[in-house]
Image (tube, rainbow, N blue to C red):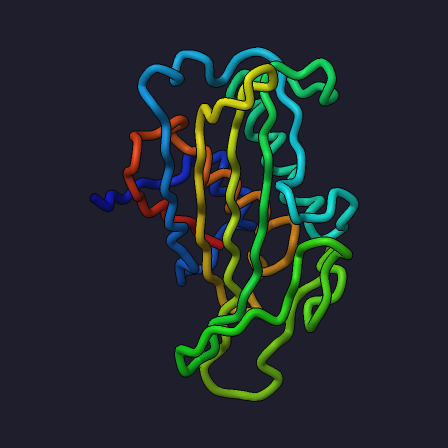
């Protein structure tokens, strides 16, 4: 089942407010077992890159920072890996949805960092469509899994997919990361297996 929700005003402000045309929504799917829900949003947590993603990637850094900020807001205390009660692993995929509907992935955000047309993705806008007409859209797929550090048991998993025009302020890395992470962790932990649409504005 797919539901719609709205980001609280404080989160929506991350979207650099106030354009009349909404770029969203962010489509969010989450999985949580009832027996593990009581372990969430408490204790210490370490935010790491998922296997196959570069821990030192500048491209991934704003997304890990945004996830960490959301976890702290929920009640966690960020710590180093050795002290953490839980580990939150982050993975990221970027793609382009062309005006004609074709999807392409010019960016690899794995071992070795980012490559392709986006470059480093740090604090810069993304200009893909250099001509007139309908704009291409930049897609972001952010996935986070929270595991028990001692047992490696999965406690929570969430995925968010966000598409925004390539000339939007929300295509820039920091704003994009904050918007997607805020949507992913809205109404945490969510209902098991449910997909919601979180509206945002720019």
State the image coordinates of residue 97 (x, y, percent, origin top left).
Answer: 47, 72
State the image coordinates of residue 126 (x, y, percent, origin top left).
Answer: 65, 68
Q: Residue at x 61, y 38 (%)?
A: 66
State the image coordinates of residue 90 (x, y, percent, origin top left).
Answer: 59, 40
Judging depth in this view, the residue of 66 and 168 nearest the camera is 66
State the image coordinates of residue 56 (x, y, percent, origin top left).
Answer: 79, 45
The extreme front residue here reads 151
Number of labels in the image equals 0
Q: Eyeballing the image, is 65 above or below 54?
A: above
Q: Residue at x 53, y 70 (%)?
A: 96
Q: Residue at x 45, y 47 (%)?
A: 160
Q: Left or right of 114: which side holds 103?
A: left
Q: Eyeballing the image, is 80 above or below 104?
A: above
Using the rendered view, name the quadrant where residue 28 is placed.
top left
Q: Left or right of 81: which side holds 184?
A: left
The extreme left residue here reads 1
Q: Eyeballing the image, is 115 above or below 101?
A: above
Q: Eyeballing the image, is 29 above or below 152?
A: below
Judging depth in this view, the residue of 170 and 159 nearest the camera is 159
Quadrant of the frame with the N terminus: top left
Q: Residue at x 27, y 44 (%)?
A: 4
Q: Left or right of 31: which side holds 77?
A: right
């Amino acid at each position: 089942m797919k539901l719609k929700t709205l980001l609280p005003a404080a989160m929506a402000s991350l979207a650099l407010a106030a354009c009349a045309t909404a770029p969203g929504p962010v489509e969010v799917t989450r999985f949580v077992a009832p027996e593990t829900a009581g372990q969430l949003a408490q204790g210490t947590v370490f935010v790491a890159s998922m296997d196959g993603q570069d821990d030192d990637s500048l491209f991934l850094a704003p997304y890990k920072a945004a996830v960490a900020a959301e976890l702290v807001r929920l009640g966690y205390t960020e710590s180093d890996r050795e002290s953490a009660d839980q580990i939150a692993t982050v993975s990221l995929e970027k793609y382009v949805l062309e005006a004609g509907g074709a999807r392409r992935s010019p960016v690899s955000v794995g071992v070795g960092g980012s490559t392709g047309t986006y470059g480093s993705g740090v604090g810069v806008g993304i200009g893909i469509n250099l001509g007139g007409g309908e704009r291409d859209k930049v897609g972001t797929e952010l996935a986070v899994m929270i595991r028990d550090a001692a047992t490696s048991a999965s406690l929570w998993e969430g995925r968010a997919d966000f598409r925004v025009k390539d000339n939007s302020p929300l295509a820039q890395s920091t704003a994009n990361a904050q918007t997607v992470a805020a949507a992913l962790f809205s109404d945490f932990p969510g209902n098991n297996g449910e997909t919601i649409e979180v509206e945002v504005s720019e």
